Amino acid sequence: MKICTIQELLNARVIVGEERLGDHVYSACGSDMMSDVLAYVKDQAVLLTGLVNPQVIRTAVMMDMHCIVFVRSKEPTPEMIQLAEESGMVLLATDKRMYEACGLLYSNGLVGNKVRETSA
Amino acid sequence: MSGALSFHFDVDGENFTMAGQASVQVKKNLRRLGLPPEVIRRVSIAMYEGEINMVIHAGGGHAEVVVAEDAIEIVLQDNGPGIANIEQAMQAGFSTAPDAIRSLGFGAGMGLPNMKRYTDEMDIQSEVGRGTRITMRVLLEN
C-alpha cells in the first residue's frame, strides 16, 4: 500500500514527508507502548500510536520504520518533527481512534502478519 | 581488536526526552561503515533499550561501541543503584520502572530480555549501590 493511500483512508494530515507519500509499505502495527514495539514488532513499516514524545520517533527509527500515524488528533512537537525530518520519516495525523484507524488499514490490505513470536 | 573502530557516548540521565540520541548516532555511524542492515538494526535496538534503561534507572552513564572485524561490541556502564536480582530482571514483564515512565511508553519489563534477544552474547555485571556494566556482542559473519 502506498503511504498516500494510508493518508486518504484515514483522512490524515501530512505533517512531514510529503515527498515520500508514494513509497510502498507492506505491514503496520499499532501501540502506545514503545517497549512492546521494540520487543514484538518485526518488519512493520508503519506505526500507529497515540503517544507523543521524541522516543516515538527514535523507536520507529530503530525499527527501520517509514511512517508514523498519530491517532486521536495527537500532534507531534516541533522537536519530534525535526527528528522525523532528519530520519526521513513520514508523519501523518488523523482524528480517528486507534481501533478504527487500524481496522481501516487492515481491512484495506495493510496487514500486520509479521509480528514476532513472544517467546524470549 | 586491532584496527577496531570505537565510539564513545555520555548518556545524560537528567532528561528522558533526550534518551536514545547516542543510539541514533550509532545507527548513522554503522550505516556509513556499510555494515549489513540486519546487524545495524540489532545493534541499535539493543543499545537503545540499554540507553533508555540507563536514563530510567541509573541517572545516565557511558556507552562504548567497538566495531571489530568479527563483532560489534556495546558496553554500557553506569553508577546507578545496581540490579539486586539479575535473574528476575531478565524475566519478560518484570519492571521496577515508575508509572511516570510507563506513561511515556516504556517500563514494560522488556528491555533486558530484548537486549539479550537481539544480541549474540550478553553479560551483566552489577553491584547494588555501585552500578551496572552490560557488555553485548553482535557477531559479524564473514
Image (cartoon, helix red, strand yellow):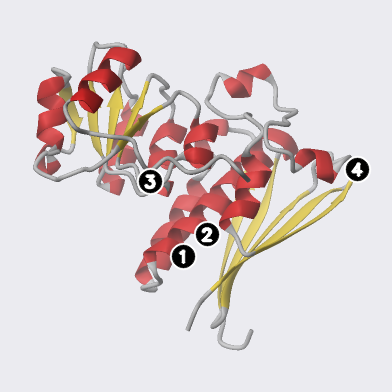
The residue sitting at 63% across, 57% down in the picture is: B63
Where disc 1 sits, the SS reads: helix
Outermost residue to the bottom = B2
Q: Tell me: A10 left or right of A33.
A: left
Q: Tell me: B35 left or right of B94.
A: left
Q: Is residue B13 visible?
A: no
Cα distance, mark 2 to mark 1? Answer: 6 Å
Q: Residues within 10 Å of mark 4 (few under 14, many from 20)?
A: few
Q: Chain of mark 4?
A: B
Q: Which residue is mark 1?
A: B39
Q: Locate residue B142, reporting x and y percent.
A: 47, 84
Res B96 → quadrant? top right
Q: Are discs 3 and 4 less than 8 Å apart at CB?
A: no
Residue A61's tag is: 3
Disc 4 or 2, which lies upstream in sequence?
2
Q: Is residue B124 visible?
A: yes
Q: Nearer the viewer, mark 4 or mark 2?
A: 2
Q: Which residue is mark 2?
A: B43
Decide: is B72 above or below B128.
Answer: below
Closer to us: B74 or A48: A48
Q: Which residue is mark 4?
A: B128
